[in-house]
Image (tube, grey):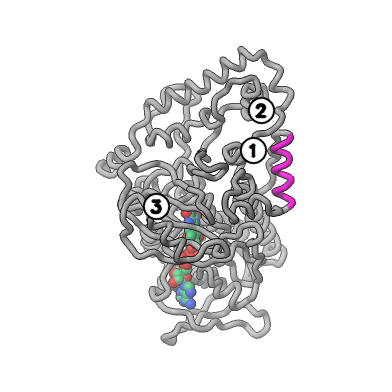
Amino acid sequence: MQRIVILGGGTAGWMAAAGLARTLGTEGRSITVVESEEIGTIGVGEATIPLIETFHQILGISALDVLRNCEATFKLGIEFVDWGRRGERYLHPFGPIGADLNGVGFLQHWLRHRAEGGAGAYIDYNLESRAAMAGRFGMTPLRQPGEQQLHFAFHFDAALYAAMLRRYSERLGVTRVEGMVQEVRRDGETGEVTALVLRDGPEIAGDFFLDCSGFRGLLIEQTLGAGYDDWSEWLPCNRAVAVQSGRLSQLSPFTRSTALDAGWQWRIPLQHRTGNGHVFCDAFLSEDEASATLLARLDGPATIEPRMLRFVTGRRRKSWDRNVVALGLAGGFVEPLESTSIYMVQSALAKLMAMFPRGERAHPATVARFNAMMATEWERVRDFIIAHYKVTERDDTPFWAHCRNMAVPDSLAERLTLFAEESLFIEQPHDLFKEPSWASVLIGQGMMPKRHHPVADAAPLEALDTQLGRMRKAVAARLAGLPDHAAYIDQCISKA
Ligand code: FAD
């Protein structure tokens, strides 16, 4: 009997339990989740990216299940307000932008057309951004060849999402133990974790442990000392104040991120309420000021007391150490700006499934490979987030002047140079965000590439104009058939 113990029952812990129970099964294996109601969960983490659907498909959970159980809404992208310059806004949408022509990416043709005075906005060629701005969403029948369903993610109530996954996991045989872990036992020779000792006495022994204990990293850091790479020099925000307010009158199918004087504010629309938060850096703004700013900017009165969360951006040096794998906040945190944390849980889980120890313990080469893959993925996400702060024309507050002038990692500096000078985006292994994402954010923040690829000059301008016009019409035609987002959710739920 193999004993897997998951410490933590937040989003990470229950995602791990559900994923393991579904893929590895509980035949010949026990899966136990230990969580403490007294400590509770972080309670935020309500916006996702489309890859979450892959996780749900593996579990056999439908979009309707998520809508019904988690007060969820659909998300088509993120609207960024006041990021590049005050008074400007742009969308980072999901889904493809335009279509390749003559073997060359759409961005090159768009840049050429733009250089000659035409083309419209880059994201006018993206269905998700048009639907988001129009407040529409629906999985309606496809009528024309080449039409696609919207690429979507969810906004959901994190507590309800964890509860749904808990029910799912328990149905598959996962055991939940309530209690506070007070001591961790280790093998004297190998240093491996052998058991969690609860405050009230009982011990939970295991062979393999997942540390989903949140920022405290009780096993991976406090017990094994895996180390942490601190990224505050590039991602200086280290506080977030979170609060809930009532349901929005317009249920927008996108997250809003508004740049403020020393950080930014999120707004996440759910069916029953709105999630709000202010992420900031305490070197530039006090906790009291940050809370007051957030409360003054809500769309309606707060329905709970504001909660202050403190963190240090960075990642655990070893995600896998001995017989412990860290998932969720125990593994690292790079700000919620692009809703990547829940995805990072999913990604680590997928890798763990593929590389799961075949025998009693994993080969050191497996552990090293897992850690190298996680490190690269974290760094790619980190660079994308830093780009939002670095590529700005704002210097109207000390915080923004700092971000605009800060040095960035070499990997990001290279990306920015290639894009600005040559409109080049070279995809690299473990890139979560691809060209449409980088281009919509960098262009949205005010970085317009200087040159386009010469092949884009090959076709006569009139022909390009016609092709781009067709693309815009196709987007408009599909948009016209989409229902109102809120009405669509109501219809789905009432039909179920
Ligand atoms: P937690 O929710 O903190 O869970 C930790 C668990 O460990 C709890 O069950 C706790 O009881 C248990 N535990 C800890 N110590 C002990 C002990 N000694 N004994 C027993 N049990 C113990 N992610 C996104 O993808 N999208 C977002 O929009 C997003 N927004 C965020 C906003 C902010 C401000 C922050 C800080 C994070 C955000 N995240 C977001 C990240 C997201 O919240 C987390 O990745 C996700 O909730 C997973 O958290 P977790 O399960 O690792 O930790």
Magenta residue check for 153? no
* Category of crowding for the residue at label 2, using alpha-carbon neighbours closer than 10 angstroms: few (below 14), some (14–19), many (at least 20): many
| Mark 2 Cβ and ligand 1 under 8 Å apart | no
Magenta residue check for 419? yes
Seen at 63% across and 48% down, the residue is 387
Residue 26 pos. (x, y %): 46, 65
Disc 3 designates what residue?
297
Q: Nearer the viewer, mark 2 or mark 1?
A: 1
User: What span is colored magenta in the figure?
Assistant: 410-421
Residue 30 pos. (x, y %): 47, 70
Q: Farthest front residue?
A: 396
> Disc 2 or 1, which lies upstream in sequence?
2
Q: Which mark is residue 25?
A: none
Q: Amino acid at mark 3?
A: Arg
Badges 1 and 3: C-beta atoms under 8 Å apart?
A: no
Disc 1 designates what residue?
447
